[in-house]
Amino acid sequence: METVELAADIRTTGGKGPARRLRRDGKVPAIFYGPKRTATLITINGKQFLQKVAALEGSHLIRFSSPADEVANKVALVKEAQYHPVTGAVLHADFYEVDMAAKLRLRVPLHFTGKAAGVALGGILQPVQRDVEVECLPADIPEFINVDVSGLNIHDAVHVSQLQAPAGVSVLYDADATLVTVLPPTVEEAKTAEAALGEVAGEAAPSAEGTKADAEKKGGAS
């Protein structure tokens, strides 16, 4: 996996007041921490974060470029990011330091590819899991995992045991857990179909009165 370079600086003060001043200057208060370090207060460029990190899917390795030795060239994952509910601006971010030689656990999104055969018959593709927890080395973190649904008919499903994870990636889920299935048509759709069939049958079959009238006409003509 390629790393994303992000500029970072050390900050010496915390609190709401300094945080607001940082945001006015286009910077974002953040924390850098890990199992072998104490939490370090840092700042990042808000625009750079939105362009290079927030727009990406899944987890990505972040490498800090910084004049401060505490964070320079350190590698991290975004553990959490907070965004403004209206503007979408990033308000705060937590970065977790990564040991490139140690496996870690994280969630990876699933991509459902292909068109299920059952959908062409009126079925509904129903994802059950949108992501799965995996374990792997940081360099092996997949951006996503593909799940081919093209062979699914109505009532068929793909389970974790059928998932084709990339090399070096272990899926930490029950092998029998369902990832995606194809449901039968909804009740309303089924009723509509039955009604349509009834109308066609009604047009094809003459009524009892019509049958009697036809018989009388034939009797009078003989």
Image: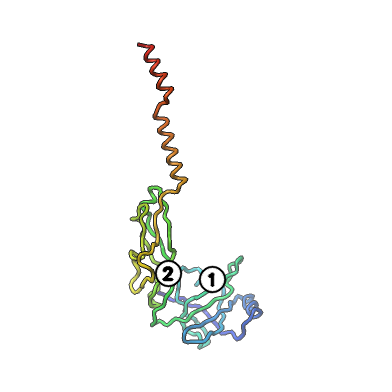
Specify the amino acid type for callout 2: Val
Q: Quadrant of residue 158?
A: bottom left
Specify the amino acid type for callout 1: Leu
Using the image, determine if residue 104 lies above or below residue 84: below
From the viewer's perspective, tell me whether residue 3 is left or right of residue 16: left
SS type, badge 2: strand
Q: In which quadrant of the rendered image does the C terminus lie?
A: top left
How far from the left and from the top, in percent, is residue 1? 40, 74
Number of numbered discs on residues: 2
How far from the left and from the top, in percent, is residue 182? 39, 54
Q: Nearer the viewer, mark 2 or mark 1?
A: 2
Using the image, determine if residue 145 lies above or below residue 210: below
Q: Quadrant of residue 156?
A: bottom left
Where does label 1 land, which residue? 50
Q: Earlier in the sequence, mark 2 or mark 1?
A: 1
Callout 1: 10 Å neighbours few (<14), some, many (20+)?
Answer: some
Residues under numbered marks 2 and 1 in contact, where contact means CB atoms less than 8 Å apart: no
The way the protein has been coloured in the rendering is rainbow
Q: Nearer the viewer, residue 74 or 162?
A: 162
Residue at the image point whose x is 41% and y is 63% from the top: 111
Where does label 2 land, which residue? 108
Callout 2: 10 Å neighbours few (<14), some, many (20+)?
Answer: many
Q: Is residue 120 visible?
A: yes
Q: Nearer the viewer, residue 14 or 177?
A: 177
Real-space CA distance between mark 2 and mark 1, rounded to the nearest whole angstrom = 20 Å
Using the image, determine if residue 181 lies above or below residue 198: below
Using the image, determine if residue 68 lies above or below residue 196: below
SS type, badge 1: helix
